[in-house]
Image (tube, grey):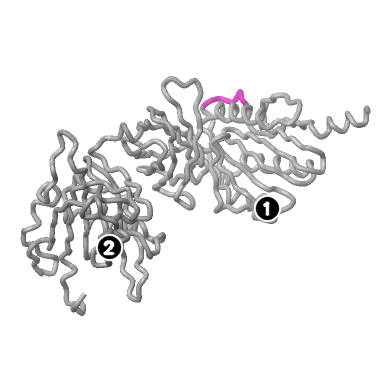
Amino acid sequence: MAHRMHALQVLASALIVAGRLPMPCSAQQPTDEPIIISVDVEKLTTQLNLKLDLHAVEVNSRDRSVGYAAPQGTERGCRSMGVAVHADVESAQAAFRRASFEVAVGPAVSIDGEDGYDLRCWSTAPEQIATVRLRVVNVTARFGWVGRMSDALDLARSMAQLLATSAEVAPRGTEVPVPSLEITVPEPVLAGKETKVTVKVTDGPRVRLASRVSLRTADADEAHSAGSYDFAPGFSSEVTAALSLPNPGHYELELTLATEGNTVFTKTCDVNVVSRAQWPEALPLHWEVWGDRLYFLRSADGEWGKQTSRQQEWLDFGLGRLPIRAGAETFRQQALDDITQVIQERWLPSVEFLQPVEECAVQPRMLCHASYTMRGCRIVYMGVLGRQVFLYIEQPDPLPEGQKRLTRADVLRDDLLQTVADEHGATSYPRVQFVAREMKRYRAMSYQGPYEPVHILLVDARLPDDVNLRSPGYR
Protein backbone atom coordinates (compact mmCIF):
# COMPACT_ATOMS: atom_id res chain seq x y z
CA MET A 1 0.00 0.00 0.00
CA ALA A 2 2.84 2.38 0.87
CA HIS A 3 4.51 1.60 -2.46
CA ARG A 4 1.25 2.39 -4.33
CA MET A 5 0.85 5.73 -2.51
CA HIS A 6 4.42 6.65 -3.39
CA ALA A 7 3.78 5.88 -7.07
CA LEU A 8 0.68 8.11 -7.09
CA GLN A 9 2.65 10.95 -5.52
CA VAL A 10 5.30 10.65 -8.26
CA LEU A 11 2.64 10.82 -10.97
CA ALA A 12 1.03 13.93 -9.47
CA SER A 13 4.05 15.77 -8.17
CA ALA A 14 5.52 19.00 -9.50
CA LEU A 15 9.21 19.70 -9.68
CA ILE A 16 9.83 23.39 -8.95
CA VAL A 17 13.18 24.92 -9.81
CA ALA A 18 14.25 28.50 -9.16
CA GLY A 19 16.98 29.19 -11.72
CA ARG A 20 19.74 31.75 -11.32
CA LEU A 21 21.65 33.71 -13.93
CA PRO A 22 24.26 36.41 -13.40
CA MET A 23 22.02 39.25 -14.53
CA PRO A 24 20.00 41.95 -12.76
CA CYS A 25 16.47 40.95 -13.83
CA SER A 26 14.81 40.04 -10.54
CA ALA A 27 11.59 41.45 -9.14
CA GLN A 28 13.70 43.98 -7.24
CA GLN A 29 15.44 45.41 -10.32
CA PRO A 30 15.18 49.17 -10.96
CA THR A 31 12.25 50.15 -13.15
CA ASP A 32 14.50 52.11 -15.52
CA GLU A 33 16.51 49.01 -16.51
CA PRO A 34 16.16 48.07 -20.23
CA ILE A 35 13.49 45.48 -20.94
CA ILE A 36 13.05 43.03 -23.81
CA ILE A 37 11.10 44.68 -26.61
CA SER A 38 10.65 41.65 -28.93
CA VAL A 39 11.66 38.01 -29.35
CA ASP A 40 12.88 36.61 -32.68
CA VAL A 41 11.51 33.06 -32.46
CA GLU A 42 13.25 31.95 -35.66
CA LYS A 43 16.68 32.80 -34.22
CA LEU A 44 15.71 31.42 -30.81
CA THR A 45 14.66 28.03 -32.20
CA THR A 46 17.70 27.87 -34.50
CA GLN A 47 20.16 28.39 -31.66
CA LEU A 48 18.30 25.92 -29.44
CA ASN A 49 18.06 23.41 -32.33
CA LEU A 50 14.27 23.16 -32.01
CA LYS A 51 12.12 21.91 -34.89
CA LEU A 52 8.92 24.00 -34.83
CA ASP A 53 6.54 25.09 -37.56
CA LEU A 54 6.94 28.86 -37.40
CA HIS A 55 4.18 29.41 -39.99
CA ALA A 56 1.46 27.68 -37.94
CA VAL A 57 1.04 30.50 -35.43
CA GLU A 58 -1.75 30.60 -32.85
CA VAL A 59 -2.42 33.41 -30.40
CA ASN A 60 -3.65 31.98 -27.10
CA SER A 61 -6.06 34.41 -25.43
CA ARG A 62 -6.11 32.44 -22.16
CA ASP A 63 -2.43 32.73 -21.23
CA ARG A 64 -1.82 35.50 -23.79
CA SER A 65 1.06 33.90 -25.63
CA VAL A 66 2.04 33.22 -29.23
CA GLY A 67 2.05 29.46 -29.79
CA TYR A 68 4.20 27.39 -32.14
CA ALA A 69 3.82 23.63 -32.69
CA ALA A 70 6.23 20.89 -33.73
CA PRO A 71 5.68 19.27 -37.15
CA GLN A 72 3.17 16.44 -37.23
CA GLY A 73 4.74 13.13 -36.27
CA THR A 74 7.18 14.56 -33.68
CA GLU A 75 7.16 11.99 -30.86
CA ARG A 76 9.91 13.19 -28.52
CA GLY A 77 11.50 16.45 -27.51
CA CYS A 78 9.77 19.83 -27.72
CA ARG A 79 6.20 19.39 -28.94
CA SER A 80 5.02 22.98 -28.61
CA MET A 81 6.20 26.37 -27.43
CA GLY A 82 4.58 29.66 -26.44
CA VAL A 83 6.26 33.06 -26.07
CA ALA A 84 4.88 36.40 -24.85
CA VAL A 85 6.56 39.79 -24.50
CA HIS A 86 4.79 41.76 -21.76
CA ALA A 87 4.71 45.52 -21.27
CA ASP A 88 6.78 45.34 -18.07
CA VAL A 89 8.36 42.96 -15.55
CA GLU A 90 5.44 43.12 -13.13
CA SER A 91 2.99 42.03 -15.82
CA ALA A 92 5.23 39.12 -16.79
CA GLN A 93 5.56 38.01 -13.15
CA ALA A 94 1.80 38.13 -12.70
CA ALA A 95 1.24 36.15 -15.90
CA PHE A 96 3.82 33.57 -14.81
CA ARG A 97 2.18 33.05 -11.43
CA ARG A 98 -1.33 32.89 -12.92
CA ALA A 99 -0.34 30.36 -15.57
CA SER A 100 1.62 28.30 -13.04
CA PHE A 101 -1.40 27.87 -10.80
CA GLU A 102 -3.59 26.88 -13.73
CA VAL A 103 -1.24 24.22 -15.10
CA ALA A 104 -0.14 22.66 -11.80
CA VAL A 105 -0.91 18.91 -11.53
CA GLY A 106 0.12 18.53 -7.89
CA PRO A 107 1.26 20.49 -4.83
CA ALA A 108 2.95 23.70 -5.94
CA VAL A 109 4.62 26.67 -4.34
CA SER A 110 4.89 30.03 -6.08
CA ILE A 111 8.53 31.08 -6.38
CA ASP A 112 9.65 34.52 -7.57
CA GLY A 113 13.08 34.89 -9.11
CA GLU A 114 15.68 36.43 -6.80
CA ASP A 115 18.57 37.51 -8.98
CA GLY A 116 17.82 35.40 -12.02
CA TYR A 117 14.73 34.00 -13.65
CA ASP A 118 11.57 32.08 -12.72
CA LEU A 119 11.39 28.47 -13.83
CA ARG A 120 8.82 25.84 -13.02
CA CYS A 121 8.49 22.33 -14.42
CA TRP A 122 5.75 19.75 -13.93
CA SER A 123 6.08 16.15 -15.03
CA THR A 124 3.80 13.11 -14.83
CA ALA A 125 6.91 10.96 -14.38
CA PRO A 126 10.68 11.48 -14.82
CA GLU A 127 10.67 9.85 -18.28
CA GLN A 128 7.29 11.01 -19.63
CA ILE A 129 5.51 14.31 -20.33
CA ALA A 130 6.70 17.60 -18.89
CA THR A 131 5.31 21.13 -18.96
CA VAL A 132 7.75 23.98 -18.40
CA ARG A 133 7.01 27.63 -17.57
CA LEU A 134 9.73 30.28 -17.71
CA ARG A 135 10.03 34.01 -17.05
CA VAL A 136 13.01 36.15 -18.02
CA VAL A 137 12.67 39.89 -17.36
CA ASN A 138 9.35 40.79 -19.07
CA VAL A 139 9.12 37.66 -21.25
CA THR A 140 7.21 34.50 -20.36
CA ALA A 141 7.64 31.22 -22.21
CA ARG A 142 6.19 27.74 -22.01
CA PHE A 143 6.86 24.50 -23.80
CA GLY A 144 5.62 20.93 -23.75
CA TRP A 145 8.23 18.18 -23.63
CA VAL A 146 8.18 14.44 -24.18
CA GLY A 147 11.25 12.72 -22.78
CA ARG A 148 13.55 13.02 -19.77
CA MET A 149 12.69 15.83 -17.42
CA SER A 150 16.36 16.71 -16.98
CA ASP A 151 16.54 17.44 -20.74
CA ALA A 152 13.51 19.72 -20.46
CA LEU A 153 15.21 21.65 -17.66
CA ASP A 154 18.43 21.95 -19.66
CA LEU A 155 16.43 23.40 -22.57
CA ALA A 156 14.69 25.86 -20.24
CA ARG A 157 17.98 27.10 -18.84
CA SER A 158 19.49 27.47 -22.32
CA MET A 159 16.40 29.40 -23.42
CA ALA A 160 16.65 31.66 -20.36
CA GLN A 161 20.32 32.32 -21.12
CA LEU A 162 19.56 33.37 -24.70
CA LEU A 163 16.66 35.60 -23.69
CA ALA A 164 18.81 37.24 -21.05
CA THR A 165 21.98 37.82 -23.05
CA SER A 166 21.36 37.69 -26.82
CA ALA A 167 20.58 41.03 -28.45
CA GLU A 168 19.74 39.19 -31.70
CA VAL A 169 17.16 36.93 -30.06
CA ALA A 170 15.79 39.41 -27.52
CA PRO A 171 16.74 43.05 -28.19
CA ARG A 172 16.39 45.53 -25.31
CA GLY A 173 14.79 48.93 -25.05
CA THR A 174 12.87 51.17 -22.69
CA GLU A 175 9.36 50.44 -23.99
CA VAL A 176 7.64 47.51 -25.72
CA PRO A 177 6.20 48.78 -29.05
CA VAL A 178 2.47 48.24 -29.55
CA PRO A 179 0.94 49.07 -32.96
CA SER A 180 -1.79 51.65 -33.42
CA LEU A 181 -4.99 49.99 -34.59
CA GLU A 182 -8.29 50.90 -36.18
CA ILE A 183 -11.07 48.44 -35.24
CA THR A 184 -14.23 48.31 -37.34
CA VAL A 185 -17.39 46.52 -36.17
CA PRO A 186 -20.76 46.74 -37.98
CA GLU A 187 -23.42 48.83 -36.23
CA PRO A 188 -25.61 47.14 -35.26
CA VAL A 189 -24.82 43.39 -35.26
CA LEU A 190 -27.58 40.81 -35.80
CA ALA A 191 -27.85 38.25 -32.99
CA GLY A 192 -26.97 34.70 -34.02
CA LYS A 193 -25.51 35.69 -37.39
CA GLU A 194 -21.86 35.72 -38.34
CA THR A 195 -20.38 39.21 -38.31
CA LYS A 196 -16.95 40.46 -39.27
CA VAL A 197 -14.56 42.46 -37.14
CA THR A 198 -11.75 44.18 -39.03
CA VAL A 199 -8.50 45.23 -37.34
CA LYS A 200 -6.28 47.52 -39.40
CA VAL A 201 -2.76 48.50 -38.37
CA THR A 202 -2.35 52.24 -38.90
CA ASP A 203 1.17 52.39 -37.49
CA GLY A 204 3.49 49.63 -36.29
CA PRO A 205 4.20 45.93 -36.88
CA ARG A 206 1.79 43.40 -38.36
CA VAL A 207 -0.55 41.49 -36.04
CA ARG A 208 -2.46 38.26 -35.61
CA LEU A 209 -5.72 37.76 -33.70
CA ALA A 210 -6.50 35.11 -31.08
CA SER A 211 -9.16 32.51 -31.88
CA ARG A 212 -11.18 33.43 -28.77
CA VAL A 213 -12.54 36.85 -27.82
CA SER A 214 -13.92 38.00 -24.46
CA LEU A 215 -17.36 39.56 -24.07
CA ARG A 216 -18.67 41.55 -21.15
CA THR A 217 -22.03 43.23 -20.61
CA ALA A 218 -22.57 46.21 -18.32
CA ASP A 219 -24.33 44.10 -15.65
CA ALA A 220 -22.10 41.00 -15.88
CA ASP A 221 -19.64 40.14 -13.13
CA GLU A 222 -17.49 37.96 -15.37
CA ALA A 223 -16.55 38.02 -19.03
CA HIS A 224 -17.64 35.27 -21.41
CA SER A 225 -15.72 34.02 -24.41
CA ALA A 226 -16.75 33.41 -28.00
CA GLY A 227 -14.97 31.73 -30.88
CA SER A 228 -13.77 33.67 -33.91
CA TYR A 229 -12.12 32.79 -37.18
CA ASP A 230 -9.17 34.78 -38.47
CA PHE A 231 -9.19 34.88 -42.29
CA ALA A 232 -5.51 35.87 -42.53
CA PRO A 233 -3.05 32.93 -42.82
CA GLY A 234 -0.42 34.64 -40.63
CA PHE A 235 0.57 38.07 -39.42
CA SER A 236 -1.02 40.85 -41.44
CA SER A 237 -1.49 44.62 -41.47
CA GLU A 238 -5.25 44.05 -41.80
CA VAL A 239 -7.02 41.21 -40.01
CA THR A 240 -10.64 40.25 -40.58
CA ALA A 241 -12.22 37.83 -38.15
CA ALA A 242 -15.71 36.35 -38.04
CA LEU A 243 -17.72 35.67 -34.90
CA SER A 244 -21.31 35.10 -33.89
CA LEU A 245 -22.96 36.67 -30.83
CA PRO A 246 -26.13 34.77 -29.84
CA ASN A 247 -27.96 37.23 -27.58
CA PRO A 248 -29.02 40.87 -28.06
CA GLY A 249 -27.36 43.46 -25.81
CA HIS A 250 -24.53 45.96 -25.51
CA TYR A 251 -21.14 44.28 -25.17
CA GLU A 252 -17.55 45.25 -24.61
CA LEU A 253 -15.49 43.09 -26.94
CA GLU A 254 -11.90 42.35 -25.88
CA LEU A 255 -9.55 41.23 -28.64
CA THR A 256 -6.22 39.55 -27.89
CA LEU A 257 -3.58 40.24 -30.54
CA ALA A 258 0.10 39.54 -31.06
CA THR A 259 2.83 41.09 -33.19
CA GLU A 260 5.56 39.36 -35.16
CA GLY A 261 7.90 40.20 -32.29
CA ASN A 262 5.64 38.10 -29.99
CA THR A 263 4.27 41.10 -28.09
CA VAL A 264 0.81 40.12 -26.84
CA PHE A 265 -1.71 42.85 -26.01
CA THR A 266 -5.46 43.47 -25.86
CA LYS A 267 -7.80 46.06 -27.37
CA THR A 268 -11.47 46.66 -26.63
CA CYS A 269 -14.40 47.95 -28.66
CA ASP A 270 -18.16 48.27 -28.12
CA VAL A 271 -20.66 46.05 -29.94
CA ASN A 272 -24.41 46.56 -30.15
CA VAL A 273 -26.25 43.25 -30.83
CA VAL A 274 -29.94 43.36 -31.80
CA SER A 275 -32.62 40.82 -32.71
CA ARG A 276 -34.39 40.70 -36.08
CA ALA A 277 -37.35 42.53 -34.57
CA GLN A 278 -35.01 45.33 -33.45
CA TRP A 279 -33.15 45.59 -36.78
CA PRO A 280 -33.45 49.08 -38.39
CA GLU A 281 -35.53 48.99 -41.59
CA ALA A 282 -33.12 51.32 -43.38
CA LEU A 283 -30.29 48.77 -43.15
CA PRO A 284 -29.99 45.71 -45.43
CA LEU A 285 -30.64 42.32 -43.88
CA HIS A 286 -30.03 38.96 -45.55
CA TRP A 287 -33.20 37.36 -46.95
CA GLU A 288 -33.10 33.58 -46.67
CA VAL A 289 -34.52 32.07 -49.88
CA TRP A 290 -34.55 28.29 -49.74
CA GLY A 291 -33.03 26.86 -52.92
CA ASP A 292 -32.39 30.34 -54.38
CA ARG A 293 -35.65 30.12 -56.34
CA LEU A 294 -39.00 31.96 -56.29
CA TYR A 295 -42.25 30.83 -57.96
CA PHE A 296 -45.11 33.02 -59.22
CA LEU A 297 -48.80 32.75 -60.09
CA ARG A 298 -50.98 35.33 -61.81
CA SER A 299 -54.08 34.35 -59.80
CA ALA A 300 -54.65 33.05 -56.29
CA ASP A 301 -56.46 29.90 -57.52
CA GLY A 302 -53.75 28.84 -59.99
CA GLU A 303 -51.50 25.75 -59.70
CA TRP A 304 -47.91 26.21 -60.80
CA GLY A 305 -47.30 22.54 -61.58
CA LYS A 306 -50.29 22.34 -63.94
CA GLN A 307 -49.20 25.28 -66.08
CA THR A 308 -47.43 24.84 -69.40
CA SER A 309 -43.75 25.72 -69.72
CA ARG A 310 -44.74 28.95 -71.51
CA GLN A 311 -47.04 29.93 -68.65
CA GLN A 312 -44.76 29.11 -65.73
CA GLU A 313 -42.96 32.02 -64.06
CA TRP A 314 -40.06 31.63 -61.68
CA LEU A 315 -36.84 33.34 -60.64
CA ASP A 316 -33.78 31.10 -60.29
CA PHE A 317 -30.58 32.76 -59.10
CA GLY A 318 -28.43 29.95 -57.72
CA LEU A 319 -28.88 26.63 -59.51
CA GLY A 320 -26.09 24.95 -61.47
CA ARG A 321 -23.25 27.35 -60.68
CA LEU A 322 -19.91 27.03 -58.92
CA PRO A 323 -19.15 29.34 -55.95
CA ILE A 324 -16.00 31.44 -56.32
CA ARG A 325 -13.50 31.25 -53.45
CA ALA A 326 -10.24 32.65 -54.81
CA GLY A 327 -10.65 36.37 -55.40
CA ALA A 328 -14.23 36.45 -54.10
CA GLU A 329 -13.75 39.83 -52.39
CA THR A 330 -12.65 41.41 -55.69
CA PHE A 331 -15.70 40.05 -57.50
CA ARG A 332 -18.02 41.22 -54.72
CA GLN A 333 -16.66 44.73 -54.99
CA GLN A 334 -17.03 44.65 -58.78
CA ALA A 335 -20.66 43.56 -58.41
CA LEU A 336 -21.32 46.36 -55.95
CA ASP A 337 -19.77 48.86 -58.38
CA ASP A 338 -22.09 47.55 -61.11
CA ILE A 339 -25.20 47.95 -58.92
CA THR A 340 -24.07 51.44 -57.89
CA GLN A 341 -24.27 52.50 -61.55
CA VAL A 342 -27.98 51.65 -61.61
CA ILE A 343 -29.73 52.25 -58.27
CA GLN A 344 -29.63 54.84 -55.52
CA GLU A 345 -27.17 54.30 -52.68
CA ARG A 346 -29.89 53.80 -50.07
CA TRP A 347 -30.96 50.55 -51.80
CA LEU A 348 -27.50 48.97 -52.03
CA PRO A 349 -26.89 45.57 -50.38
CA SER A 350 -24.08 44.91 -47.92
CA VAL A 351 -21.05 43.69 -49.82
CA GLU A 352 -20.89 40.46 -47.78
CA PHE A 353 -24.37 39.48 -49.09
CA LEU A 354 -23.04 39.29 -52.66
CA GLN A 355 -22.28 35.75 -53.80
CA PRO A 356 -20.00 35.51 -56.89
CA VAL A 357 -20.41 32.31 -58.92
CA GLU A 358 -19.08 30.89 -62.16
CA GLU A 359 -21.63 29.77 -64.70
CA CYS A 360 -21.38 26.14 -65.78
CA ALA A 361 -21.16 26.63 -69.54
CA VAL A 362 -18.82 26.14 -72.49
CA GLN A 363 -17.90 29.82 -72.19
CA PRO A 364 -18.47 30.47 -68.46
CA ARG A 365 -19.37 33.96 -67.26
CA MET A 366 -18.76 35.54 -63.88
CA LEU A 367 -22.13 35.95 -62.18
CA CYS A 368 -23.21 37.31 -58.82
CA HIS A 369 -26.41 37.33 -56.78
CA ALA A 370 -27.79 38.50 -53.45
CA SER A 371 -31.11 38.39 -51.61
CA TYR A 372 -31.85 40.91 -48.87
CA THR A 373 -34.53 43.03 -47.22
CA MET A 374 -34.58 46.72 -46.45
CA ARG A 375 -37.11 49.56 -46.09
CA GLY A 376 -39.98 47.09 -46.02
CA CYS A 377 -38.99 45.50 -49.36
CA ARG A 378 -37.55 42.14 -50.35
CA ILE A 379 -34.88 42.37 -53.04
CA VAL A 380 -33.05 39.93 -55.29
CA TYR A 381 -30.04 41.04 -57.31
CA MET A 382 -28.68 39.00 -60.22
CA GLY A 383 -25.84 40.19 -62.40
CA VAL A 384 -23.29 39.34 -65.07
CA LEU A 385 -20.22 41.20 -63.89
CA GLY A 386 -19.45 44.23 -66.03
CA ARG A 387 -22.48 43.63 -68.28
CA GLN A 388 -25.87 43.33 -66.60
CA VAL A 389 -27.74 44.21 -63.41
CA PHE A 390 -31.15 42.60 -62.79
CA LEU A 391 -33.21 43.59 -59.75
CA TYR A 392 -36.37 42.04 -58.32
CA ILE A 393 -38.04 44.22 -55.68
CA GLU A 394 -41.25 43.11 -53.99
CA GLN A 395 -43.62 44.77 -51.53
CA PRO A 396 -46.60 43.23 -49.71
CA ASP A 397 -49.97 43.68 -51.36
CA PRO A 398 -51.83 45.41 -49.80
CA LEU A 399 -49.18 47.64 -48.29
CA PRO A 400 -48.83 48.11 -44.52
CA GLU A 401 -50.21 51.37 -43.23
CA GLY A 402 -47.85 54.30 -43.80
CA GLN A 403 -45.88 52.62 -46.60
CA LYS A 404 -46.08 53.83 -50.22
CA ARG A 405 -45.82 51.95 -53.47
CA LEU A 406 -42.34 52.06 -55.03
CA THR A 407 -41.78 53.28 -58.56
CA ARG A 408 -38.64 53.26 -60.68
CA ALA A 409 -38.03 56.89 -59.70
CA ASP A 410 -37.74 55.82 -56.06
CA VAL A 411 -35.07 53.21 -56.81
CA LEU A 412 -33.08 54.15 -59.93
CA ARG A 413 -30.41 56.83 -60.08
CA ASP A 414 -31.54 60.24 -61.28
CA ASP A 415 -28.76 60.53 -63.89
CA LEU A 416 -29.36 57.34 -65.88
CA LEU A 417 -30.56 59.35 -68.92
CA GLN A 418 -27.38 61.40 -69.20
CA THR A 419 -24.53 61.11 -71.71
CA VAL A 420 -21.24 59.86 -70.29
CA ALA A 421 -17.76 59.40 -71.79
CA ASP A 422 -15.07 56.88 -70.87
CA GLU A 423 -11.28 57.49 -70.65
CA HIS A 424 -10.89 56.76 -74.39
CA GLY A 425 -13.50 59.33 -75.45
CA ALA A 426 -16.28 56.85 -76.26
CA THR A 427 -19.67 58.32 -75.29
CA SER A 428 -22.70 56.42 -74.01
CA TYR A 429 -26.33 57.50 -74.01
CA PRO A 430 -28.11 56.83 -71.85
CA ARG A 431 -25.65 56.20 -69.01
CA VAL A 432 -27.26 52.80 -68.54
CA GLN A 433 -29.83 51.12 -70.81
CA PHE A 434 -32.67 49.72 -68.74
CA VAL A 435 -36.22 48.41 -68.73
CA ALA A 436 -38.38 48.79 -65.60
CA ARG A 437 -41.69 46.93 -65.18
CA GLU A 438 -44.29 46.87 -62.42
CA MET A 439 -46.69 43.95 -61.87
CA LYS A 440 -48.74 42.07 -59.32
CA ARG A 441 -48.22 38.38 -58.64
CA TYR A 442 -48.61 35.66 -56.03
CA ARG A 443 -45.15 34.55 -54.87
CA ALA A 444 -43.90 31.41 -53.07
CA MET A 445 -40.57 29.76 -52.26
CA SER A 446 -41.86 26.37 -53.39
CA TYR A 447 -44.01 25.61 -56.42
CA GLN A 448 -46.46 23.94 -54.01
CA GLY A 449 -46.88 27.18 -52.05
CA PRO A 450 -47.99 28.83 -49.89
CA TYR A 451 -48.35 31.85 -52.18
CA GLU A 452 -48.73 35.42 -50.99
CA PRO A 453 -49.78 38.51 -52.95
CA VAL A 454 -46.96 40.93 -53.79
CA HIS A 455 -46.34 44.01 -55.91
CA ILE A 456 -43.15 43.66 -58.00
CA LEU A 457 -40.76 46.15 -59.56
CA LEU A 458 -38.37 44.57 -62.07
CA VAL A 459 -35.31 46.39 -63.39
CA ASP A 460 -33.10 44.93 -66.11
CA ALA A 461 -30.12 47.17 -66.87
CA ARG A 462 -27.39 46.75 -69.47
CA LEU A 463 -24.11 48.42 -68.56
CA PRO A 464 -22.25 50.61 -71.12
CA ASP A 465 -19.27 48.28 -71.52
CA ASP A 466 -21.61 45.50 -72.70
CA VAL A 467 -22.08 47.43 -75.97
CA ASN A 468 -18.69 46.91 -77.62
CA LEU A 469 -16.82 45.67 -80.70
CA ARG A 470 -15.55 42.45 -79.13
CA SER A 471 -17.28 40.24 -81.71
CA PRO A 472 -20.81 41.59 -81.19
CA GLY A 473 -23.76 39.57 -82.45
CA TYR A 474 -26.93 37.82 -81.42
CA ARG A 475 -26.89 37.07 -77.70
- Residue 411 in the image: state x and y as whole percent: 15, 49
Q: Main secondary structure of the magenta part?
A: loop
Near-viewer residue (384 or 104) = 384
Q: Residue at x 35, y 73 (%)?
A: 361
The verdict on residue 290 being magenta is no
The C terminus is located in which quarter? bottom left
Q: Which residue is mark 2?
A: 307
The N terminus is located in which quarter? top right
Kindly identify which numbered label has been placed on residue 90: none
Residue 99 shows up from this direction: yes
Give the residue type that dot 2 points to. Gln
Kindly identify which numbered label has been placed on residue 49: 1
- Residue 24 in the image: state x and y as whole percent: 62, 30
Read off the magenta span.
Answer: 25-31
Give the residue type that dot 1 points to. Asn
Q: For residue 462, what is the image quadrant?
A: bottom left
Q: Is 295 situated above or below 376?
A: below
The verdict on residue 28 being magenta is yes
